[in-house]
Image (spheres, helix red, strand yellow):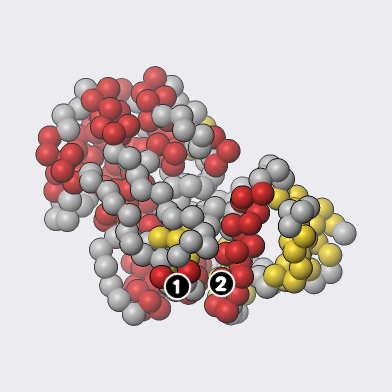
Amino acid sequence: MQRLKSGERSRVWADGDRIVKQVVGDQVAFEREVTALRLAEHTGVVPRVLDVDHEKRTVVLERLRSDPFGEDWVIAYARGLARLHMATGPEHAGLLPRQAVPDPVPFLRFVRALEVEVGGAEAELVFEDSGKFDLLHGDPCPGNDMYSPQGARFVDFEGAALGDGLTEVVYLRIGFPTCATVSETPRELREAAEQAYFEERGFTAGLEDACVRWFVSGDALVQRAERDGTDHLARVVDEDWFWYSTTARGRLMFRARVVATFTETHPEMSALAARLLDRMGQVWEPQPIDTRRTHVS
């Protein structure tokens, strides 16, 4: 078998038309991945599970075709996410964890630490469980997607959950918040991708609230292994750190710029984001954000 590149949380090998993946040391993540793959198998957007060894945390998967992707890859990505999200419903409650609900308190402390007025935004920062049962990938990042004439397919479901799919299609708008690479999708492509997502799902909805949820999440400033309960928004007041393609402060400034445009749907939060962006520009060095997809090596 040929050893393939993988993250610290897993070991992956190619064996002909099969992929063998072993999750390192995290039985819960392993079981989440296997459960999600089986729940989504009928959608055609995930590899088929061929064999499982629960004791060794090893799963044998169909090896997916992976072609080079074009500039419009985001449209296939959005359609694939829609199909994935539709894989589950209320009848699957309890099979996977619920999507986490953001806690606005650390974000509000962060705002005050930067000496920015909260204003009336606090009333727009009341988050509740969505009550939805979409099958969420948990980390739909560049590198966890593959493309062929059949469209996008996804791998690496260790963070799978049940919740609101809108929080994942907004990756294209808010800059891939759980990902090592941050990129700004050109507006025309992003709008076409969002339209494709809603066409696939058969409804339309606003995406602003989902973006705000990522903006206030301190865990969206660090990689998964560091999401351990630390208040990363408190950290970023006094220090900055690189996570692959840009810094924590660069991520926050980009997200603030996005949320500052939500003047119609979230007027108070939009105004707060604009004040924050102005303040961060005064006390921090702006960090560039890619405008094209980059790969994690």
Instruction: Find disc 1 in the rendering and name its residue.
Output: 91
Front-lying residue, 201 or 27? 27
Q: Secondary structure at mark 1?
A: helix
Instruction: Find disc 2 in the rendering and name its residue.
Output: 40
Q: Is residue 212 above or below residue 170?
A: above
* Nearest to N terminus: mark 2 or mark 1: 2
Rendered image: mark on residue 222: none
Q: Is residue 102 above or below residue 247?
A: below
Q: Give the quarter of the image for residue 66.
A: bottom right
Gap in Å between the C-alphas at discs 2 and 1?
A: 14 Å
Q: Residue at x 48, y 47 (%)?
A: 178
Q: Secondary structure at mark 2?
A: helix
Can residue 202 be seen in this snapshot? yes
Question: Looking at the picture, how far across and down is residue 94, in whole percent?
Answer: 48, 61
Can residue 293 be seen in this snapshot? no
Furthest residue to the top? 238
